[in-house]
Image (cartoon, rainbow, N blue to C red):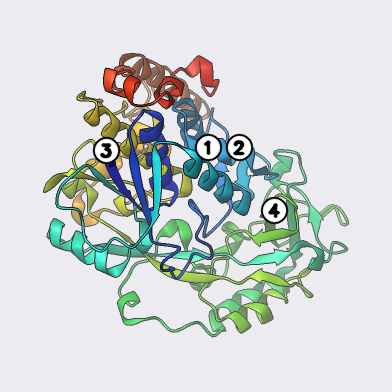
Amino acid sequence: MHDIHIIGGGLAGSEAAWQLAEAGFRVRLSEMRGVEGTPAHQTDGLAELVCSNSFRSDDADSNAVGLLHAEMRALGSLIMREGDRNRVPAGSALAVDRDGFSAGVTEALAAHPNIEIVRERVDTLPASGPTIVATGPLTAAQLAGSIGAATGRDSLAFFDAIAPIVHRDSIDMDVAWFQSRWDKGDGDDYINCPLDRDQYQAFVQGLIDGEKTEFKEWERSTPYFEGCMPIEVMASRGPETLRHGPMKPFGLRDPRTGKRPYAVVQLRQDNALGTLWNIVGFQTKLKHAEQVRLFRTIPGLERAEFARLGGLHRNTFIRSPELLDATLRLRAAPHIRFAGQITGCEGYVESAGIGLLAGRFAAAELAGRTLEPPPPTTALGALLGHITGGAAADSYQPMNVNFGLFPPADGAPKKAERKLALTARAKRDLAAWLTGNQSPFAASKVEKRSPAGDRFSTSLETNGAL
C-alpha cells in the first residue's frame, strides 16, 4: 500500500518523492523508462539530464537561479544534494557529472524505505487517490490524451534542443585556451575556440544553409522557447545575433595575441573525469553529418570527435494558470497535482523546485494540515506564482526563474543594489515562512510512520544554505 502515487521519475518527480518519503509517507513512484524509452533520454536512470549538464549560476546574492539553489538546499532538496556531490568545474555556475548525478538520485530513492519504484507506463490519470503527475516535457501520448480529456484543453508545446558533446582529447589546445568570461570563477573553467570575422561569417552562413532534419507535422506550428533556441534559428535572425549570444567574445582575450577575438565558441566540462565537453548554446536541428562537417570548421575543433550530436524534441505543458490552484492541484480533479516542466516552468532546478513544493503541499495535506505557499518575494514563491496565476492562460509560456517574477523591492534601490536587496528580502521571508510552516512535517502520523520524518529539516541554520 502507498499513501501517494507519483507518475514520472525525472527531476520533479524524484524531488517530490524524496520530500514525501522524508516526511514519512509511503510513495509509489512510476517511471516509464525501463519499459519504454523517449526520443531524448538515453538511460533508465531517474533524474537523467537530457540537455545541458548545468544548473546555471550558483550565486545566491545576485542571481535568481542561485537564490533558488539556496532555498532548495534549505528545504532538504535531494536534487541539490546530489548536484553538489557531483559538481564539475564551471566557474560561478553549478554544473554536474550527469551520470554520477542521476546515479546518486536513483540510489537514494531506491534505498529509501518509504519509496517503491515501479517501472511501468501509466496511460490514464488515476480516478482517485493522492497523485502527483511529473511526467515532464515528453509525456507519453496516451497519458497526454488523458490529461487533455481531464483539463478540457489541448496541451501546448515548445521545442527543447540538445547541444553536442565533444571528447576533450580531440580539441586542439594549440588553438583553443582555458578561460572563464571576465575570469569569473577559477578562470579556466571553459575551453574557448576563437574565430576571426571571416570565419565567423562563414560559420553563420553554414548554419543557415546547412541541411536540417525534417519537421514532423505536429512540430510545424510549435513555437520555440526563447531560452533554448536552436543555433541556426538564432543565426537566421541577423548576422550579429550569435556574437551577442552564445558566441559573444566579450570578457575573453586570446592569451596568444592579447586581443579579443571577433567571436568565440565555448565548451564546458560535462563529466567529472573531464573527458567530455559540451558546446555551450549549440543546440541544433542540423542533420548529424552536417553538424560534424560544420562544427569541424571551428578553429580548435578541426579534429573533434563527438560523443553526442545535437538534437531537438517537443516539450509539452499545460495552461497552469487556468488549470491549477495555488498548491498545484488540478481544479477539475483536486486529488491530482502537477509538478515540473509539464506545469510550464523551464530549467532543471525550476522543475525540481516545483516538484519540491508539490511534495510538501501533498505531505501537508496527507497530514491533515494546510501549507501556505512560500511568499512571492522568494524564488520558490515567485516561480510558483508565475505558474499558478502570474500570467494569462492564453499567452502562458515556459519561464525560467528570474527577478522579473519578484515583487519590486521597497525603496526602489539603484540598479546595482536591486538584486542584492531582492535576495536579502527573499532570505528573510523564506526564514519566516519556514518558522511558521514546520508543523505539516511534525504531525503525529508522520512521526509514527517512519523515523525518516525525524530527519526532515526545515532549519536554515542546520542546512547552512541561506
Q: How many marks?
A: 4
Q: Taking 171 as reference, is 68 above or below it?
A: above
Q: Taking 56 as reference, is 299 above or below it?
A: below
Classify mark 2: helix, strand or loop: helix
Q: Taking 12 as reference, is 199 above or below it?
A: below
The numbered disc on residue 84 is: 2
Asked if the residue under mark 1 is in contact with the one under mark 2, i.e. CB atoms within 8 Å, the reply is yes
From the image, state whether disc 2 or disc 4 is nearer to you: 2
Classify mark 4: helix, strand or loop: strand
Kindly identify which residue carries mark 1. Answer: 80
Kindly identify which residue carries mark 3. Answer: 3
C-alpha separation, residue under disc 3 versus residue under disc 1: 25 Å
First in sequence, mark 3 or 1: give its number. 3
From the image, state whether disc 1 or disc 4 is nearer to you: 1
C-alpha separation, residue under disc 1 versus residue under disc 4: 19 Å
- Residue 428 lies left or right of residue 291; in this view the side is left
Q: Quadrant of residue 265?
A: bottom right
The amino acid on which the numbered mark 3 sits, given as a three-letter code, is: Asp
The numbered disc on residue 269 is: 4
C-alpha separation, residue under disc 3 versus residue under disc 4: 41 Å
The amino acid on which the numbered mark 4 sits, given as a three-letter code, is: Gln
Task: Identify which residue is drawn at 50% across, 34% down.
Answer: 69
Classify mark 1: helix, strand or loop: helix
